[in-house]
Image: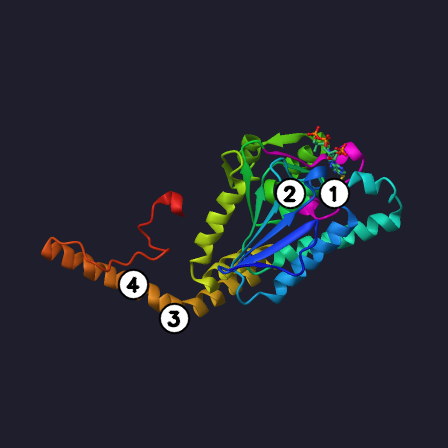
Amino acid sequence: MTEANPNSTPSLQMHIDSDGIALLTFNRPEAHNALDLVTMHAFANAVEQLYMHLEDLRAVIVTGAGDRAFCSGADLDEMRYRNTEADAREMSAVMGDALLRLERLPVPVIAAINGFALGGGSEVALACDLRFADERVKMGFVHMNMAVTPSWGAGQRLQRLVGYAQALQIFLESQTMRAQDLAQLHLVNAVTERHKALDYAMHYARQIAAKPADTVRGMKAMLQIGLQQSYEEALTFERELFTALWASPAHDKAVEAFFSKSFDKQNERRNGQPSQDLYNGPDDADSAPDDE
Ligand SMILES: CCCC(=O)SCCNC(=O)CCNC(=O)[C@H](O)C(C)(C)COP(=O)(O)OP(=O)(O)OC[C@H]1O[C@@H](n2cnc3c(N)ncnc32)[C@H](O)[C@@H]1OP(=O)(O)O
């Protein structure tokens, strides 16, 4: 089932499929998916809608329509007439809050960067947990070119990802970066063949969706808490999280699967016959590295 969400708007599409994978698509390809205020509000509403579907949600993907752009940032056509401090505050609040809410979702959020990600578009990508970039991607924190600083959170997020000096250099130079540069800086998790960023993200999300849901959420929460609380508090959280998961049915099931596999392997050795019911679950430890 792919549910066309009633909260989709012409410029922001939202779908949640039967695996619990939500897809948010900026849909203004004629303007390289630039965000006007209507689209910013639609995006913020869509993120709030995700909080209404938390129980079934497994992963979220953000991408741009067409094959040229993820998002080219704020809509400059509109923004040239919205140049007061009040306008700036409104735009920063809508997108800043929406991206924080996106980042705080309990499930992994993936940016499928299918082309230009510039200015505010690069800020959206940075608010995602994972970034997969088309090999033709051009991503840039180009705010300096418009004589502004970031305001949707990229100042803090970039610094955390690449460190103070590297972040300052990137903001000062205001260059667009290619996929290989982004990979070298660890700003993207993987570079895909051209036109394949979304397919890659979907495939990845389905693999996540097949893993134990509470453990997936736990992994994200464990790392997020370290960014938000003290070291000691985060260590305590990590221990408590582990304790809860250790005593969970999912852990029992995984341990049982391990032993039934060993049992099957022993039988195989004894009979020289492959077992018919080898455990081949999605989180099978024998799966190929590129399936991980
Ligand atoms: C806190 C937020 C701060 C910000 O986001 S400030 C904005 C930062 N973004 C930018 O500076 C990117 C501006 N765009 C560009 O540099 C170029 O359009 C870009 C992405 C390199 C693509 O270049 P080209 O392939 O030559 O395409 P093009 O320029 O002819 O663009 C095609 C159509 O898209 C439009 N477009 C692209 N980026 C836009 C934007 N951000 N706001 C409004 N419209 C935008 C562009 O005007 C053009 O429209 P049209 O076909 O002439 O009607």
- In space, the residues marked 4 and 2 are separated at their CA atoms by 41 Å
Residue at 24% over, 58% down: 278
Residue identified by numbered label 4:
257
- Residue 191 located within the stretch drawn in magenta: no
Residue located 66% across and 61% down the image? 6
Cα distance between the residues tagged 4 and 1: 49 Å
Q: Position of residue 123 (x, y in %)?
A: 68, 44
Decide: is 135 above or below 202: above
Q: Over which residues does the magenta segment extend?
A: 137-157
Mark 4 vs 1: CB contact within 8 A: no
What amino acid type is highlighted by mark number 1? Pro
Q: Earlier in the sequence, mark 4 or mark 2?
A: 2
Q: Earlier in the sequence, mark 1 or mark 2?
A: 1
Residue wearing tag 2: 158
Q: Mark 3 near mark 1, Cβ–Cβ under 8 Å?
A: no
Distance between mark 3 and mark 2 Cα atoms: 38 Å
Q: Residue at x 24, y 63 (%)?
A: 260
Q: For numbered disc 4, what is the local secondary structure?
A: helix
Residue topped by disc 3: 249
